[in-house]
Image (spheres, grey):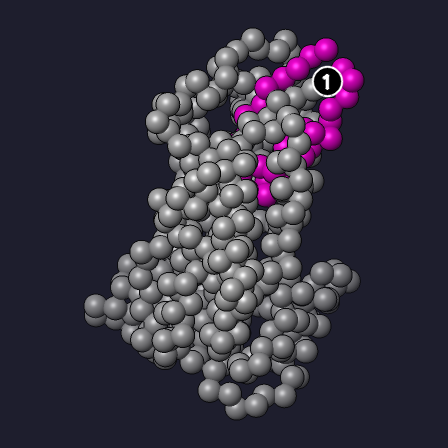
Amino acid sequence: MPHYKIAIVGAGPSGYFAAQALQNSVTEDLTFSIDMIERLPTPWGLVRSGVAPDHPKIKTVSKVFEKIASEPNFRLFGNVELGKDLSLEDLTNNYDAVVMATGSAIGKKLGIPGEDLANSISAAQFVPWYNGHPDYADFKVDLSGKVAVVIGAGNVAMDCGRILAIDPKELDETDTADHAHQDLHGSNIRKVFISGRRGAEFAAFTAPELRDLPKLEHTDVYINEEAIALAHKNAEAKGEIEKHLASNLEAMKLIAETPKHGHPRSLEFLFSHTPKEIVGSDKVEAIVYSTPSGDVTIPCDLVVTAIGYEATVIPGVVYAAGKITNIDGRVKDSNIYVVGWAKRGPSGVIGTNKSDAAEVVKLLILDLKDAKASGDIAELLSDSHKIVDQPYWVRINQAEVAAGESRGKPRVKAVSVPDLLRLGQP
């Protein structure tokens, strides 16, 4: 009976869904051993470090990941970095196939003057900062000003805008990183703009996220009704309005029509605003937009850019346009495959990765030939290297959850690698 060894690099949603697709493909005539390799001591990827803390329901998919990890053919190798602790060649030589599920972690640039001013930051820095990612525990966000601008028209932009605009008390019972929670409580930001360069009909927000905004207790949310009407008109001119767009526009209309209470905190959407220049001497002071009616300048103190992500380059892998070069998930002339954002770019929601991974795994299985007779990848790692296997991660997880219970939170995250490793010590 053929038995194949598969390595998955990256312990985010796309990696787990690839492992699930392999597990679902096991038959009497086909079995797999799956080793998942993750740079951090913590798995779950964006479910842990990307999903906004005030949206805990989305994080419940982690239960699916833990079920996948509990299968006997699965091993976790956390705290193991490809390119440092192991080479790509180590993996391609020791496994029948290598699945790259490394995501996209670098924020795309606007390419406009003033983008490098102090307090012009990327969502790729801001989101992991408030979510307790170890790489951003020491990142500094200056929240002393009163106005923030978020550039982007997708759910990441909306998360950034909402976290800046809501009363921090609404985050008290979430797993927001302690350092970020403290800084947000001391924030002077009271006005937040979310800007998209095209009309509302092109916005990539999802309707459930939009419908949550009128529920904010201490923040008034504004969308211009004329912008929604124009979006309707433009969409209808192209034919029947697609279901997701109709749902989006309906949710925007609900926001526009929701009574405002004169809260000191507000969140406002701007459409057809193309960033032209960020203005300031030492730090951000204003942003200039090009609009259909001419240039508009908005004084502001913080700019967060949320216009997409690019993949981090890993030695030995070819990249183009911010993602790993592939054809339908296959990397040419190799036993390497790609899933998730590293394959298709930063698009879709968490569930999108499930069907994507399943399709790639089908191709992987079709390509399998004679199984390799190879050693154990653990033998290539130094004896002193602290590998976070599944039992080790379970102890970290349990310790964080226990720390949260006494504070009325789902967990209290450790935000440094040494602290995480200490939490999981037997």
Q: Residue at x 36, y 69 (%)?
A: 183
Query: Going by the picture, which residue comes out furthest to the front?
Result: 426
- The answer to whether residue 127 shows anywhere in this view is no
Q: Residue 340 versus residue 140: which sits nearer the camera?
A: 140
Percent x, y for residue 294?
43, 76
State how many labels appear: 1
As shown in the figure, which amino acid type bears the numbered disc 1?
Leu
Percent x, y for residue 151?
45, 64
| Magenta extent | 1-30
Q: Residue at x 37, y 48 (%)?
A: 419
Residue topped by disc 1: 30
Q: Residue 216 versus residue 208: which sits nearer the camera?
A: 216
Q: Determine whether, in the image, residue 307 is placed left or right of residue 256.
A: left
Q: What element carries label 1?
A: loop
Q: Which residue is drawn at 53% across and 74% down?
A: 170
Q: Residue 54 versus residue 337: which sits nearer the camera?
A: 54
Query: Going by the picture, which residue comes out furthest to the left?
Result: 282
> Would you say residue 20 sits in the magenta stretch?
yes
Judge whether 377 appears above or below 163 on screen: above
